[in-house]
Amino acid sequence: MKLLILLLTLGLLAGCSTEQQTDSEQDSTAIVSSEDAVEESVSKEELNEAEVIDDLTEYPETTAIQETIELTELTGYIVSDNPGTRILIFTNEEKQVYKSILVKDEKQLKVIDLEQNEVLIDETVPAS
């Protein structure tokens, strides 16, 4: 009987530890995906499928972006808006000039000048 309880306990512990590793692997994948997203502009297909931003005030991070970049002459696109991150692209005519990445849980905003390949903003923004 003790052997049966021991085996059941070991099986339960082994199952729980496997699930934790899977969560860690998913977090690592999300971090790598965010880092990859920072380094490059989006494809023409992604930009064509993206939604045009009609009202910048709908997105709280645009207040911080406007303090650094003059957005009135640019067209903004929502490339990705999922529970974890939001990616915006700003274009001047057909050329992608700025990329904004907001990590929602951490309220971390990163804005990249795609022409100069330079990070303009890397800061925490106030909660909306």
Image (cartoon, helix red, strand yellow):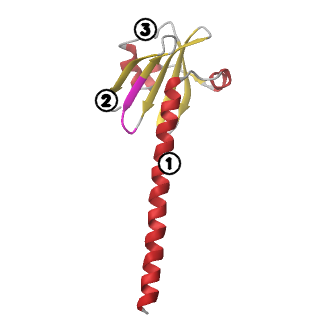
Q: Is 9 situated left or right of 52 in this image?
A: left
Q: Residue at 36% x, 24% y: name it.
A: 122
Check if mark 3's residue and mark 1's residue have beta carbons within 8 Å: no
Q: On the picture, is 12 further left or further right than 125?
A: right
On the image, the x and y values in percent for residue 104 come to 41, 36
Q: Secondary structure at mark 1?
A: helix
Q: Could you give the CA–CA distance between mark 3 and mark 2, rounded to whole angstroms?
A: 20 Å
Quarter holding the N terminus is bottom left
- At 59% across and 23% down in the image, what residue appears? 42
In the image, residue 20 above or below residue 100: below
Where residue 47 sits in the image (x, y, percent)? 63, 22
Label 3 or label 2, whichever comes before in sequence order: 3
Residue 109 highlighted magenta (yes or no): yes
Q: Nearer the viewer, mark 1 or mark 2?
A: 1
Query: Which residue is under mark 2?
Result: 126
Q: Secondary structure at mark 3?
A: loop
Q: Which segment is the magenta one?
A: 105-110
Q: Is residue 100 magenta?
A: no
Q: CA distance from mark 1 to mark 2?
A: 27 Å
Q: Nearer the viewer, residue 103 or 9?
A: 9
Question: What is the three-letter code of the residue carrying label 2?
Answer: Pro
The residue singled out by tag 1 in the image is 26
Specify the label residue 48 is tagged with.
Answer: none
Disc 3 designates what residue? 70
